[in-house]
Image: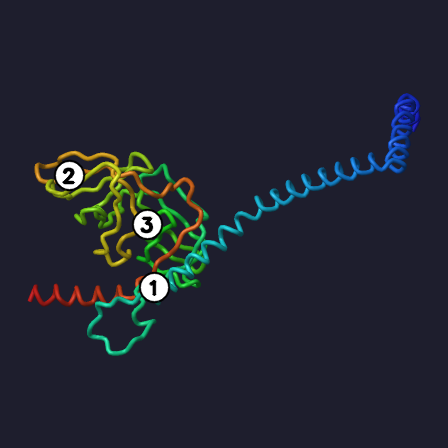
């Protein structure tokens, strides 16, 4: 207590000076219209700046919720687009059924674990069997192909991404339509290889590489990456260096794609192969 009293006595002149200044400024503002206007403007300016910064701070902390909302909206719109864009080439259907014409379903998910420095990288999602996820479902982001679901539990799913040595996908040059096999050599998390492209195909640096649609998992035309360079390989094909469109170190929101006709396609192909073997 004595220490506090000595401290107050020591700063008493400063406190008295501040008090007198406050009284003087108050009298000046209250009895002078010009100074009242200046004071009011200063208060408004300070309040506006404070509110703007507070709003920016709130917006920053709400970005995660906003991203989740946008991801859900994106998935909903993709489902809606699938429903209203039935193919005109389905000549043998006599009933116009939107649900029957739909080929894919989309649902959003969050990445909760991710590796990029291993030879066999994996991604973990925050949704699982309870939300309808199954093995062999495609996973993509707004930037392009991410990978394919390999394991599913009740509430989680693991994804084999493009940057896994065991991953392979059928991809094509978007401009010319020539397709080949895309793999990851295990060197850099954003560089892959596209092989089996014939030498007579037109290839240019910067060309877009997309899914071919020949797999039983991915829709056709999803961006995989871009041509970074190419060389002749084996005398008949190009080996193309690919810069992947997805930055796996910044991956947060993804979409899981369910192919509604995958089972039918696999059964038909298996039956055809069995007939040929016989």
Q: Secondary structure at mark 3?
A: strand
* Position above or below: 96 against 12: below
Task: Say the numbered circle drawn on residue 238.
Answer: 2
The Cα atoms of the two marked residues, 3 and 1, are separated by 21 Å
Q: Mark 2 vs mark 1: give the one in front.
A: 1
Q: Quadrant of the N terminus?
A: top right
Q: Residue at x 14, y 43 (%)?
A: 201
Residue at 8% in and 36% down: 235
**Residue underneath mark 3:** 147
213, above or below 200, in the image: below
Given residues 28 and 137, the one toward you in this image is 28
Within 10 Å of disc 2 (Cα), the crowding (few <14, some 14-19, many 20+) is many
Vertical comparison of 106 with 47: above or below: below
Expressed as whole percent of the image width and height from the top left, the position of residue 45 reads 71, 38
| Residue annotated with mark 1 | 82
Report the side of 35 relative to 223 (left or right): right
The dot on residue 273 is none
């Amino acid at each position: 207590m004595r220490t506090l009293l000595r401290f107050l006595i020591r700063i008493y002149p400063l406190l008295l000076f501040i008090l007198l200044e406050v009284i003087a400024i108050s009298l000046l503002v209250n009895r002078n219209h010009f100074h009242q206007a200046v004071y009011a403007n200063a208060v408004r300016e300070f309040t506006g700046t404070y509110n703007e910064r507070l709003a920016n701070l709130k917006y920053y902390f709400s970005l995660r919720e906003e991203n989740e909302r946008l991801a859900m909206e994106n998935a909903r719109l993709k489902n809606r687009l699938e429903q209203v864009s039935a193919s005109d080439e389905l000549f043998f259907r006599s009933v116009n059924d939107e649900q029957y014409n739909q080929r894919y379903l989309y649902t959003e998910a969050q990445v909760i674990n991710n590796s990029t420095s291993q030879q066999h990288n994996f991604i973990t999602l925050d949704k699982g069997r309870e939300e309808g996820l199954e093995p062999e479902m495609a996973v993509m982001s707004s930037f392009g192909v991410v990978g394919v679901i390999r394991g599913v539990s009740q509430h989680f799913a693991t994804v084999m991404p493009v940057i896994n040595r065991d991953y392979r996908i059928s991809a094509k040059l978007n401009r010319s339509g020539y397709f080949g096999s895309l793999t990851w050599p295990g060197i850099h998390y954003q560089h892959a290889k596209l092989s089996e492209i014939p030498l007579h195909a037109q290839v240019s640096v910067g060309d877009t590489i997309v899914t071919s649609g020949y797999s039983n998992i991915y829709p056709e035309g999803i961006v995989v990456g871009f041509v970074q360079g190419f060389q002749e390989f084996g005398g008949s094909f190009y080996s193309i260096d690919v810069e992947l469109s997805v930055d796996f170190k910044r991956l947060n929101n993804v979409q899981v794609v369910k192919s509604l006709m995958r089972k039918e396609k696999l059964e038909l192909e298996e039956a055809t192969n069995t007939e040929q073997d016989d």
